[in-house]
């Protein structure tokens, strides 16, 4: 089994651990629980998921049909982010006749984690039936297989793995002076017996790198070294090679005494020195996401450990998370946030630029889901925080909202599992007005989001760069993002086919996924425009007295400064062609053909398409001089490659029908556009009704008369 060392996931899910999976419920009440199952249940209740898995292996080896053990196994793998194993066990659980709604949901989520988005959507639909009041399924289904659009890297951002990462975990960066504060459980040059029973990794502390200039991209060699360590045995038994005992750890719970061996991290740490923050801040428990207040105080997240005492909740005996503020010139005075509570968690602080509003995460009673975002207001005079207010259902979901962050303009960023995304936690942005969202939270898409957990987003004041954390590589690491600086430009000249002279005043249309751009050639017949990245274009040139000309090109795959040259030639209309231009309106009425439509993901000809196709057959029999082009399209759901293939199949299906009715196949040309030419605004990520999506699943028929594409003519400006 390949371990995913995601200490963040364990640390942060303490926020939502009060509702554990019910275990043992499948066992008859009269039957005594076997000792090995009882031990597994105890480890599970204590959140010791790695230890629980070990015990559950033995249980299931003897009793492979034990549903309670299967459920604990599936949930344990889900909690430690082993998506392959979680997928296996939730698939097995969902074969039960009375599958629990949460099994269906977690299976859908695991499929998304493995980028199996189409199957994931199917299971979200099943979850929507099983739990009709839960918005998570609805959010995903509204987006549908168009989720793949979020995974398409548009080339707007460059993401780099940074040299502050080790074989341990690094996450939740925060700008501090000229440097960066972040959380890490690295163990450089020594061993630690204080490890977290959740996934048996060391606790996290807050570290500082004092100069951002020292943070750079990791070389390929170092990346290979780190990957080899992660794939190998990164842990070993404690330093005296004995079995772990009760006194091996004085921290909360029963922890493994295995320690992280981090050779690559030692080499990187020698290049980029990171120092622990003061002992008043770092403790023997977890220290996590933090924020700097305007007066210089540090607000940070820590396990429930204050003034040398660790406390647990009455229900479940869990050491929850709390917020603390370190004040004074040396951060030597620690104050507890007034709304901390032993019975629920509070953490992940974010403040507006002026420090007047605090947004944080909590699972306090009365929320919408696992963890919600709350806000408090601070008066400038007393610097006291008001009673927390939930940010409401327009932001919070039945899932988990975590890791808030305000940029300099007051825009709120956060991570969530409750909205449609690429898998795990995705990063979203939303603009607030009077602490109310002005719109729906927007998914930042790839490459900032991935099929793993993406969180802890911060942005530099230039708004062109920043940092975030992600476990996309199997571990919590910090990545840098920068706005791509390359430019893709279009240049071209429209010339007369016969004379080769430039044509001034010609109209050039650029059709693309977002609409149509209109250009006009200058005196030299030239045109130019900056282009969108990763976009397919159709370019059309037209001029009165000339036959329209078109071509296709793409910016997909371009990752550096590039100028595309697209020369276009227009031929003077001959006598027959001029007749078409002059009779444009009347000919369009004569040769009007209706579009035909398709079912989702299908290419067969539906019965409701027969009248339009039969009318076209009649026209082509009566006018043997015309030819046609079948221009087929899809809706925006699914990937570009999939949709182009599907639209080709649709075009060929229409062509086959016409040939079956006796039309010569040489008179039919098939063109296919995928999702690049939508008829409405149903782009990836835009909620649309099925009726609106249906309008895009179509084949249009272009009529070619005397070599002129009648369908592309603008009769008012031929």
Image (tube, rainbow, N blue to C red):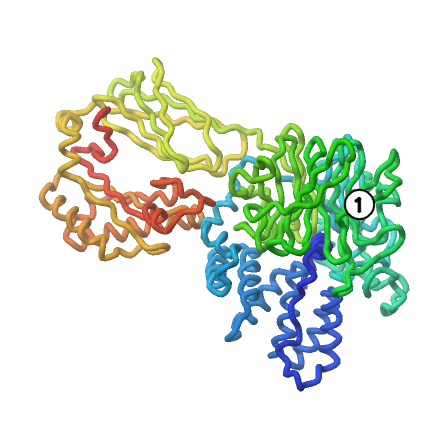
Q: Is residue 217 left or right of residue 663?
A: right
Q: Quadrant of the N terminus?
A: bottom right
Which picture quadrant has residue 478?
A: top right
The residue singled out by tag 1 in the image is 324
Identify which residue, 240 or 470, lies in the foreground: 470
Identify whether 156 is placed above or below 99: above
Q: Identify which residue is drawn at 75% across, 75% down.
A: 39
Identify whether 153 is placed above or below 662: above
Identify which residue, 7 or 438, lies in the foreground: 438
Residue 235 position, x and y percent, is: 79, 59
Q: Identify which residue is drawn at 46% across, 60% down.
A: 125
Residue 215 seen in render? yes
Residue furthest left as drawn = 622
Secondary structure beneath dot 1 equals strand
Which picture quadrant has residue 432?
A: top right
Residue furthest bottom as drawn = 30
Identify whether 142 is placed above or below 59: above
Q: Identify which residue is drawn at 29% across, 43% down.
A: 631
Q: Is residue 169 left or right of residue 91?
A: right
Residue 649 position, x and y percent, is: 32, 52
Residue 324 position, x and y percent, is: 80, 45
Crowd tier of the residue under label 1, counting other residues whose Cα lies within 10 Å: few below 14, some 14–19, many 20 or above: many
Q: Quadrant of the C terminus?
A: top left
Number of marks in the image?
1
Residue 76 position, x and y percent, is: 67, 65
Q: Is residue 530 left or right of residue 19?
A: left
Q: Is residue 302 left or right of residue 158?
A: right
Residue 228 seen in render? no
Identify which residue, 105 or 382, lies in the foreground: 382
């Amino acid at each position: 089994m390949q371990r995913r060392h995601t200490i963040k996931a364990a640390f942060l899910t303490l926020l939502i651990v009060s509702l554990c999976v019910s275990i043992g419920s499948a066992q008859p009440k009269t039957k005594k629980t076997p000792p090995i199952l009882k031990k597994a249940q105890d480890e599970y209740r204590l959140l010791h998921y790695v230890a629980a898995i070990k015990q559950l292996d033995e249980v299931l080896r003897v009793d492979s049909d034990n549903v309670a053990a299967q459920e604990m196994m599936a949930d344990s793998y889900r909690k430690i982010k082993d998506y392959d194993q979680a997928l296996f066990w939730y698939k097995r659980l969902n074969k039960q006749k009375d599958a629990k709604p949460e099994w269906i949901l977690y299976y859908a989520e695991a499929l998304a984690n493995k980028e199996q988005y189409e199957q994931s959507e199917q299971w979200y639909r099943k979850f929507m039936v099983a739990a009709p009041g839960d918005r998570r399924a609805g959010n995903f289904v509204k987006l549908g297989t168009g989720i793949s659009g979020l995974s398409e890297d548009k080339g707007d951002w460059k993401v780099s793995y940074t040299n502050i990462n080790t074989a341990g975990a690094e996450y939740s960066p925060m700008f501090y002076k000229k440097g960066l504060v972040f959380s890490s459980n690295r163990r450089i040059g020594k061993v630690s017996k204080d490890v977290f029973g959740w996934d048996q990794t060391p606790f996290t502390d807050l570290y500082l790198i004092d100069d951002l200039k020292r943070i750079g991209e990791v070389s390929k060699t170092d990346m290979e070294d780190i990957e080899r360590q992660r794939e190998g045995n990164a842990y070993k038994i404690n330093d005296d090679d004995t079995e772990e005992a009760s006194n091996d750890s004085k921290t909360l719970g029963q922890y493994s005494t295995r320690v992280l061996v981090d050779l690559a991290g030692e080499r990187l740490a020698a290049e980029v020195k990171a120092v622990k923050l003061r002992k008043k801040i770092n403790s023997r428990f977890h220290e996590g996401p933090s924020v700097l207040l305007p007066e210089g105080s540090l607000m940070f997240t820590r396990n429930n450990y204050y003034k040398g005492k660790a406390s647990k909740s009455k229900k479940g005996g869990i050491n929850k998370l709390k917020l603390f503020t370190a004040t004074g010139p040396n951060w030597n005075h620690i104050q507890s946030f007034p709304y901390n509570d032993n019975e629920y968690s509070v953490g992940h602080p974010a403040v507006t630029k002026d420090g007047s509003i605090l947004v944080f995460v909590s699972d306090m009673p009365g929320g919408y889901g696992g963890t919600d975002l709350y806000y408090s207001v601070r008066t400038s005079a007393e610097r006291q925080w008001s009673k927390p207010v939930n940010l409401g259902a327009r932001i919070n979901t039945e899932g988990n909202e975590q890791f808030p962050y305000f940029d300099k303009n007051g825009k709120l960023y956060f991570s969530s599992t409750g909205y449609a995304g690429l898998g795990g936690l995705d990063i979203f942005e939303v603009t607030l007005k009077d602490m109310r969202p002005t719109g729906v939270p927007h998914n930042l898409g790839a490459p900032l989001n991935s099929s793993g957990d993406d969180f802890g987003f911060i942005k530099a004041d230039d708004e062109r760069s920043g940092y975030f954390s992600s476990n996309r590589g199997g571990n919590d690491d910090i990545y840098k993002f920068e706005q791509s600086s390359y430019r893709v430009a279009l240049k071209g000249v429209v010339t007369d086919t016969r004379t080769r002279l430039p044509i001034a005043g010609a109209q050039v249309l650029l059709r693309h996924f977002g609409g149509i751009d209109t250009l006009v050639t200058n005196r030299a017949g030239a045109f130019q425009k900056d282009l969108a990245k990763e976009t397919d274009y159709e370019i059309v040139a037209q001029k009165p007295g000339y036959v329209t000309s078109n071509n296709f090109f793409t910016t997909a795959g371009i990752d550096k400064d590039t100028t595309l040259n697209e020369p276009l030639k227009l031929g003077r209309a001959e006598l027959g062609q001029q007749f078409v231009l002059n009779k444009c309106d009347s000919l369009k009425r004569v040769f009007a053909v209706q579009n035909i439509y398709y079912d989702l993901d299908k290419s067969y000809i539906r019965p409701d398409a027969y009248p339009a196709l039969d009318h076209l057959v009649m026209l082509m029999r009566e006018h043997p001089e015309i030819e046609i082009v079948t221009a087929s399209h899809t809706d925006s759901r699914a990937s570009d490659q999939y949709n182009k293939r599907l639209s080709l199949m649709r075009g060929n299906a229409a062509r086959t029908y016409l040939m079956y009715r006796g039309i010569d196949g040489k008179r039919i040309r098939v063109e296919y556009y995928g999702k690049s030419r939508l008829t409405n605004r149903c782009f990836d990520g835009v909620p649309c009704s099925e009726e609106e999506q249906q309008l895009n699943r179509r084949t249009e028929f272009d009529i070619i008369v005397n070599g002129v594409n009648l369908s592309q003519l603008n009769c008012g400006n031929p």
